[in-house]
Image (cartoon, rainbow, N blue to C red):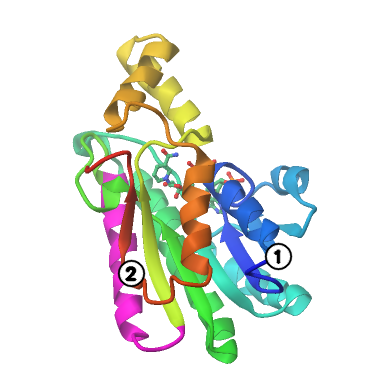
Amino acid sequence: MTLQGKHALITGGGTGIGLAIAQALAAEGAIVTITGRRQDVLDAVAGDGITGMAMDVRDEADVCARIAQAVDARGPVQICVANAGIAEGRAVHKTTLEFWRNMMATNLDGAFLTIRECLGSMRQTEWGRVLTIASIAGVRGLPGAACYTASKHGLIGLTRALSEDYVGKPYTFNAICPAYVDTPIITRNTDSIAQRTGLDTDAARDMMVNMNRHKRLIAPEEIAATALWLCGPGAQSVNGQTIEIAGGQI
Ligand code: NAP
């Protein structure tokens, strides 16, 4: 129980990678708040130290009010996992400003607002771990996905800058950068690739499997194991890093 009593807030924690991280942290004794837009999805996985709270990361007033509510109910947030995100490939010449803005609002503004609102708690308790769930698209260009790539590069910039702002203090800021992980995002991408290319869904899924260096999808629990390590004892000097979980070099 290395995280006994620590309040962890995980955006997008009702599904996929966020849920695996929530369950791993709760198993180590953390008091976990998970957020997402759909209360029913959150309620379905709540219990065993995990509480669901609807919150749209694109909405500043909602993020401020909800995080304050979580702090009132469960204490200062000391572990913040900015995980909520959307992923969709689109050629730049077909990308509308609306598409661009929504991706940035979710993947980048959402992380900024969440981390900003959790920093007060961390500064008050003088202990904090911030994890951002970026992507390999944060450290290299992903073909056909310029908007997603730009949002994840921005997220890594934010993480690195924060690690410099607080260097030498009892907080760490790290970005986890997965390749393709077996979550609902992959299912949606598979459907979209199949629709665009005329491939069947198995062939579309194989395309993503083959893009991972070890030729298999990564399990969400593999990402959670890294998150747990970064929050636990022994990782206090790991700061400002981008940790690629990709089955090989990318
Ligand atoms: P996922 O299951 O679709 O998770 C995304 C989560 O974000 C959902 O729980 C969703 O909940 C939440 N979300 C989306 N928009 C939101 C908003 N406006 N406000 C609040 N919550 C919002 O897919 P995932 O793969 O676990 O993705 C988690 C993160 O990992 C994302 O940032 C993604 O970019 C990153 N990632 C995934 C992969 C992969 O291959 N799966 C690889 C690299 C990085 P609601 O829909 O209920 O709001």
Q: Nearer the viewer, mark 2 or mark 1?
A: 1
Q: Which residues are magenta?
A: 147-170
Q: Which residue is mark 1?
A: 29
Judge left or right: residue 181 versus residue 152: right
Going 52% across and 67% down the picture, which residue do you hit?
A: 231
Q: Amino acid at mark 2?
A: Leu
Identity of the residue drawn at 49% across and 61% down: 229
Looking at this view, is 191 or 19 the one in front?
19
What's the CA distance linking mark 2 and mark 1?
29 Å
Instruction: Indicate the secondary structure of the residue bearing disc 2.
Output: helix
Overall secondary structure of the magenta section: helix
Quadrant where the N terminus sits is bottom right
Q: Report whether the residue tagged 1 is closer than 8 Å to ligand 1.
A: no
Q: Disc 2 marks which residue? A: 158
Q: Is residue 2 above or below residue 144?
A: below
Measured as percent of width and height from the top left, residue 128 is found at 52, 78
Three-letter amino acid code at the position of disc 1? Gly
